[in-house]
Image (cartoon, rainbow, N blue to C red):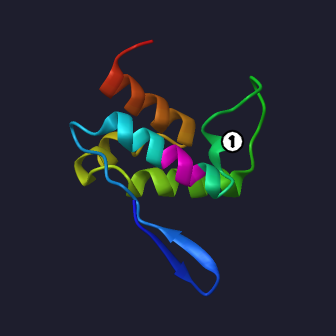
Amino acid sequence: MTLAREGGSMTYQVPVLTPINYPVWAVKVKSIIDTHGIWETVNVRVLGEETDTKKKKQALAFLFQAIPEEMVLQMASYTDPKQVWDGLKTRYLGVD
């Protein structure tokens, strides 16, 4: 992952998911999403707890940037970042 300083803030290179890099991809993406303060939209701590709509949209946009284009259409019906995250986890690691 590349880090760059721009005017006092850091930008992160978005890693793109491949057929073989899911475990490392998940660690990197979780770290970046957490750094931006939007991991709570993926890892909802309390059942039924609502998360901020703007944060959900940010996390969803980030995840769509981090997956291959052919997967974007497969996941386009998901409106919640947790759905995308869980769908990818199931696809690459199987059902828990």
Q: Is residue 20 magenta?
A: no
Instruction: Classify residue 89 as left or right of residue 53.
Output: left
- Magenta region: which residues? 29-33
Please determine whether, in this image, residue 50 is positioned above or below residue 17.
Answer: above
User: Magenta stretch: dominant SS?
Assistant: helix
At 40% from the left and 60% from the top, the residue drawn is 14
Q: Secondary structure at mark 1?
A: helix
Q: Position of residue 23 (x, y in %)?
A: 36, 34
Q: In this rendered view, identify the residue nearer to me: 34 or 77.
A: 34
Q: Position of residue 31 (x, y in %)?
A: 55, 48
Callout 1, which amino acid?
Glu
Expressed as whole percent of the image width and height from the top left, the position of residue 9 reads: 62, 77
Q: Position of residue 15 (x, y in %)?
A: 36, 55
State which quadrant residue 32 falls in.
bottom right
Q: Which residue is mark 1?
A: 40
Residue 32 lies in magenta, yes or no?
Answer: yes
- Specify whether 86 is left or right of 66: right
Q: Residue at x 32, y 26 (%)?
A: 91
In this orientation, which residue lies closer to the viewer: 61 or 89? Answer: 89
Numbered circles on residues, count: 1
Name the residue at the bottom extreme. Answer: 7
Q: Quadrant of residue 65?
A: bottom left
**Is 19 rendered above or below residue 53?**
above
Label 1 packing within 10 angstroms: few (<14), some (14-19), many (20+): some
Q: Residue at x 39, y 59 (%)?
A: 1
Left or right, 13 with reference to 57 = left
Residue appearing at x 56%, y 35% in the figure? 82
Quarter holding the C terminus is: top left
